[in-house]
Image (tube, rainbow, N blue to C red):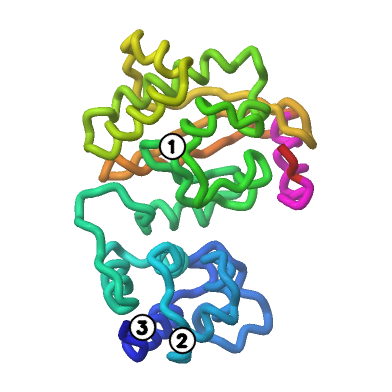
Amino acid sequence: MDRDGLAHFLRRRRAALQPEDVGLRPGPRRRTSGLRREDVAALAHMSTDFYTRLEQRRGSRPSEAMVGAIARALRLTLDERDHLLALAGHTPPPRGTRSEHVTPALLRVLDRLDTPAQIVNDLGVTLAQNSLAEALMGAHVGGASVFYRWFTGDPAERALWPPEDHDEHSRRYVAGLRAVHARDEEARAFVATLLRESEEFARLWCEHEVRAPATTRKRIAHPQVGLIELDCQILTAENQTEMLVVFTAAPGSEDAEKLALLGVIGTETFAP
């Protein structure tokens, strides 16, 4: 681990960012021209003390997951992410493979949205969410794939959607995985796991439906605001493994009013 190089790189990258670059408000009393250490720590979901120690060359070696979280918080490119991993004493993953690193361009779009939005990969893993997406669907960054949660009977995942919509969700999820199944070994291994662990998945897999993710309308059974119906738009990154999923409601509609209420409620009272 190169403590000096790691500390210097983190300080330089933090100073190069402004609050609005990562979706934060500048605030009237900011003495730091770039981001503050507590800003980066909050974005990376780690303690300010731990991050501060890294910048002061006093910290313990961060795990690969922590380095990835810091890279996302600092909006690093893939090259910069790999450099940060090397400074922390880790071997960067081979290029061209699926990773938890999010394309900076997608993150910039996510930061500027005032409606629920999240970035997911083609295997259903949530890579980033804004606060409204967490309030709407729960916090899932760093958790299991939505496909895995769904087909292994996670009650919280199933409760989020009206029972009469469950069959369509199952079919859409299976058909979407069919579209990426041949992409790489990780996708094939993931499908094999679901085939072993879910009879429902195995039954639908045999129907051989193929359907890439597409714009649609979704109904969400939210525990605080009740049933809410939203348009779901999907923007796919150039690497084809990342998607920005955006939920919107027609202005002036009851669903738009419920989204506004979610902005007030936030995530504190969210309970599956």
Gap between marks 2 and 3, in whole Å? 7 Å
Instruction: Please tell me whether mark 1 sits on a helix, a strand or a loop.
Output: loop
Tally the marks: 3
Residue at image position (71%, 50%) is: 267
Left/right placement of residue 80 relative to residue 231 reads left
Q: Residue at x 32, y 67 (%)?
A: 81
Kindly identify which numbered label has been placed on residue 55.
2
Q: Where residue 6 is drawn, which disc sits there?
A: 3
Labels 2 and 3: the sequence-earlier one: 3
**On-image quarter of the C terminus:** top right
Q: Residue at x 54, y 13 (%)?
A: 167
Quarter of the image where one finds residue 62: bottom left
Instruction: Check if residue 261 falls in the magenta segment.
Output: yes
Left or right of 223? Residue 84 is left
- Image quadrant where residue 248 sits: top right
Q: Position of residue 64 (x, y in %)?
A: 38, 65
Q: Amino acid at mark 3?
A: Leu
Crowd class of label 3 (few under 14; some 14 to 19; many from 20; radius 10 Å): many
Sequence-wise first label, 2 or 1: 2
Q: Residue at x 68, y 45 (%)?
A: 135
Near-viewer residue (260 or 89): 89
Q: In the displayed structure, would residue 56 be above or below residue 36?
A: below
Residues drawn in magenta: 255-269
| Residue 14 in the image, given as x and y percentages of width and height | 45, 79
Depth check, front residue: 179 or 218: 179
Residue 124: image tag: 1
Residue type pointed to by label 1 = Gly
